[in-house]
Image (spheres, helix red, strand yellow):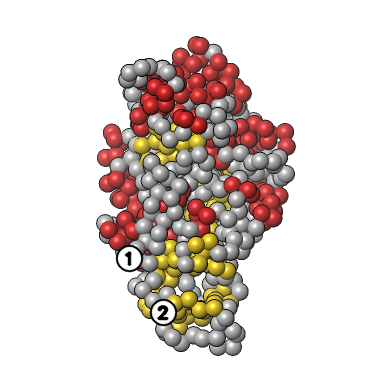
Amino acid sequence: MIKTPDLILKRGLIVDGTGRPGAIGDVAIRRNWILAIDAPGSLEGAPEELDCKGLVIAPGFIDTHSHSDLRVLTEPELPMKARQGITLELFGQDGISVAPIRKADRPQMERTLAGLLGKLDREWDWESVGEYLAAVERARPSVDCSYLIPHGAVRLSSIGMEDRRATSSEILAMQDLIRQSMREGALGMSTGLIYPPCCFADTAELIELCKAVAEFDGVFVAHMRSESDYLEDAVAEMIEIGKHSGVRVHISHFKVAGQENWPVIDGVLEMVRIAQAEGMRLTADQYPYIAGSTMLGAILPPWAHAGGVEATLERLASADERARMRETMLDRSRSEWDNFWKWSGPEGIIVSDIPSGRNPEYVGKNLAEAAALAGKSDGGVSEEAAANFALDLLAHERMGVGMISFSQSEEVVQKIMREPYVNVCTDGLLGGKPHPRTYGTYPRILGRYVRELKVLTLEEAVRKMSSLAAETFNLKRYGRIEEGGQANVVVFDPQRVIDQATFEDSKQYPVGIEHVIVEGELVIRYGEPYRSSSGVVVRSQHLPR
């Protein structure tokens, strides 16, 4: 060996991220790259060596759907992610995030994002994607970070929060902003077609905007228009966008919500396979739980969000408009929107976060329990009373509330998990009493779905957590244990690794994640935080075609 390594991982089972069977060996790291891979005991000369006998050496895990956009600026250690083995996170999800944002739009966007990303304890000091990424770099995070352009921010800059079609000139302006943001390092564009203002866009608008993303070989990442009653139509829209724009399409947190909809999964998976066979680049990610998490404001019908937060609050203050919202929410018929209330009911929706710090007694309780606590009823709480409580809470907190909602099937979760194009993500909101996926996703895959249930092999699970994600998002040199590859590595105990976070006690770190290396530096050593500032911002390297 010509160059001296800084660190050698010795005698571990190397599962390289390709899906190939693992093999015992040593891995040498120099600076931020993998210097050499050799037979056990062959590599020597590093100032630090870690005995990995009985452990797995794997590529660092990549979280393709993260909501750490603001938390990374105040808690750059991100221990809830690093201690899972995550070495790279992708921010800017669901079409609603923090850049590009004009200074005049900041107050509205801060209110809109409070239930999703929490609040920053200081004024935002950026407008463009490039300026935001520079702020992340200054924070010196423990893990690598990348970013997607949020469609909602792009639309806000040209159209505001209006519920209407974009004009041709507005489309051109949005395309220009997308191109600028791609040049500044974004990996693609995200949308959230149940969230304002993304939900006001039609398919034609999305196709035109995705043409600008495709110029850079970027990825279009979509929280689809429906994950329940109209799931087939929603997937068909993704396929149409991909075919007419040429963009790579990635479906966020692939799921089927609502018991009556679970049987459609086989037909939907066949739709995806057919599109892929025809040459479309279509992928997805998934978290391994039967409950989701988002802003409580998502229980409201789309029309209630038109005009922005202030307009929604005015509607909540109107007896007639509030009654109309409640009637729409409680309607169990086939709806034109993703009705969380229909899927989950008040017992299946949990208040997970109230960023203002007020009313902490409601956090962790479902809406029926919280409504009873609020004095809506001495006995059982009716659906109408629980709905009134939810509307009151949204009004009082100015829409800044997070929720967890139960609506999915374990059988469907496993069917989606087996699909070879589906990688792993957390979709983890960080505030209040978060969803356990924030702390436990990756160890849960390894412990529950690999070791216990054998839904996936160890090699396939690692591929889904590393190289598949890297290939999907054009992350060169990431996601594999190979000479010359990025030195983002996780070492875990395959017999012990498991999540400990539960819905009742979610802020629990996993066990069995022994060492985590980011950019060649140990971030987690023997299961405990070690260093915390080796992460970098990973920007797109693609020039326009």
The x and y percentages for residue 544 are 64, 57
The residue drawn where x is 41% and y is 66% is 492
Res 433 seen here: yes
Amino acid of disc 1: Gln
Rendering coords of residue 124 (x, y %) = 70, 42
Residue furthest top in the image: 320
Which residue lies under the disc numbered 1? 495
**162 or 254, nearer to the observer:** 254
Front residue (pair 46, 96): 46
Q: In this view, does 396 lie above or below 209?
A: above
Say which residue appears at 36% left-offset and 57% top-offset: 498
For the point 54% across and 78% down, the residue is: 48
Residue 73 rendering spot, x and y as whole percentages: 64, 49
Disc 1/disc 2 C-alpha distance (Å):
16 Å
For the image, the number of numbered tags is 2
Where is residue 64? Give x, y as percent: 49, 53
Tell me the number on the disc at residue 11: 2
Residue 158 placement: quadrant: top right
**Residue kind at label 2, given as amino acid type:** Arg
Figure quadrant of residue 234: top left
Label 1 vs 2, first from the N-terminus? 2
Residue 446 shown left or right of residue 315 in the figure:
left
Residue in the foreground of this view, choosing between 232 and 405:
405
On screen, residue 526 above or below 103: below
Specify the quadrant that holds the N terminus: bottom right
SS for dot 1: loop
